[in-house]
Image: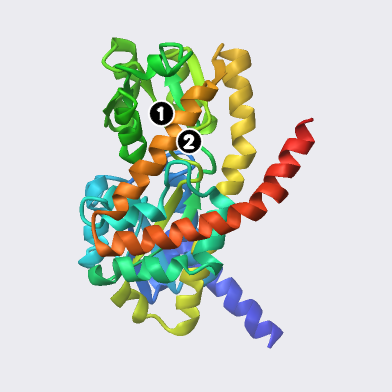
Amino acid sequence: MQRRDFLKKAGAGGIALGAGLAASGSASAKAEYKWKMVTTWPKNFPGLGTGANNLARLITEMSGGRIHVKVYGAKELVPAFEVFDAVSRGTAEMGHGASYYWKGKVPAAQFFAAMPFGMNAQEFNGWIYHGGGQALWDEVYAPFGVMGMPGGNTGVQMGGWFNKEINSLADMKGLKMRIPGLGGEVLKRLGGTPVNLPGGELYTALTSGTIDATEWVGPYNDLAFGLYKAAKYYYYPGFHEPGTCLEAIVNRKAYEALPKDLQSIVINAAKVANQDMLAEFTARNPGALKQLVDDHGADLRRYPDDVVAQMRKVSAEVVADVAKQDALSKKVYDAYSNFLTSSRVFTDISELAYLKARDE
Ligand code: CA
């Protein structure tokens, strides 16, 4: 047995070397299932794109190469905002993005990414995995033949980069800020002008004065983008994205064609990728923040209390308005709100009380 194992190993090594293939090439060659993963991120984009790579690598490794997942950056196979459709029609078996990108098609999808003043990452994962959230996500995506699940989380984001000081609510009036989604709607109701621009245009828009401010993600990603060179004030907290979930989506037919062990690997690899991305942001944000402040002179500011209070009030109205769009949005809104209302009772006397106590 030992000799046969040795020969087998030597033989496999010999083939790999002789063929001059990269490891991924040989894994692909023997794969029983070759899956494509389309993503909304630029290829290898720090944190988000690398998170998608991590998920693909986990599935490939955990399955011993029986599933080989090849990752495509935005525009490589389909444009960023066509990822959902591509997975729905089976052009790709998997996707990685964020569910709020599909709000035009499915308004209820937004609850599975981020809500202004909504759940943080810990609460959101509790809701999805153990609080009924996953069943609702399945229901929302079922008409499209797509399964959605957490595939990463940024944690609490930053408020953003500003070329103007925000000292009171009056300073929000007329503010031109790149802030997409529901956060943008909140800004609008505070008298500002939300602008939606792709990440690659933020730097130029800020330096040219086309916008006064922009949000992006947090220190790790913002440092990589060089936003500190285009704006001085770095505001917190990112009330509009308090724990943004990045989603992994899977074509249901492709999933159902897998044997049970491989199905389990896909589901559990996504769980690992979800947790690992949050851990990476947790590890990298503090060092990046230190660099931004100490080396690049970022002026770190907290939003004034009256601005935060008004943002909180208006956010509740904006989120409640999503529920009015259709019956399914109302159903998910009710479930989301009920989970948040009940979970925060404990969050307040555990995480929040502890973090306050630690800071005293
Ligand atoms: Ca953001």
Q: Residue at x 49, y 15 (%)?
A: 233
Q: Residue at x 42, y 46 (%)?
A: 115
Camera-side mark, 2 or 1: 2
Identify residue type, mark 1. Glu
User: Ligand 1 near label 1 (Cβ, under 8 Å)?
Assistant: yes
Mark 2 or mark 1: whose residue is earlier in sequence: 1
The one nearer the camera, 167 or 291, is: 167
Q: Residue at x 65, y 77 (%)?
A: 6
Q: x and y percent of residue 328 in the render?
A: 29, 64
Q: Which mark is residue 215?
A: 1
Q: x and y percent of residue 360 in the render?
A: 79, 30
Q: Residue at x 54, y 58 (%)?
A: 125
The one nearer the camera, 94 or 97, is: 97
Identify residue type, mark 2. Phe
Q: Which mark is residue 109?
A: none
Q: x and y percent of residue 353 in the render?
A: 73, 43
Q: x and y percent of residue 100 in the render?
A: 33, 49
The one nearer the camera, 224 or 10, is: 224
Res. 58 visible in picture = no
Pointer 1 local density, CA inside 10 Å: few below 14, some 14–19, many at least 20:
many
Decide: is 282 above or below 108. above
Pointer 2 local density, CA inside 10 Å: few below 14, some 14–19, many at least 20:
many
Res. 214 visible in picture = yes
User: Ligand 1 near label 2 (Cβ, under 8 Å)?
Assistant: no
- Badge 2 is on which residue? 239
Mark 1, secondary structure of its residue: loop
Mark 2, secondary structure of its residue: loop
Per the model, the C-alpha gap separating discs 2 and 1 is 11 Å
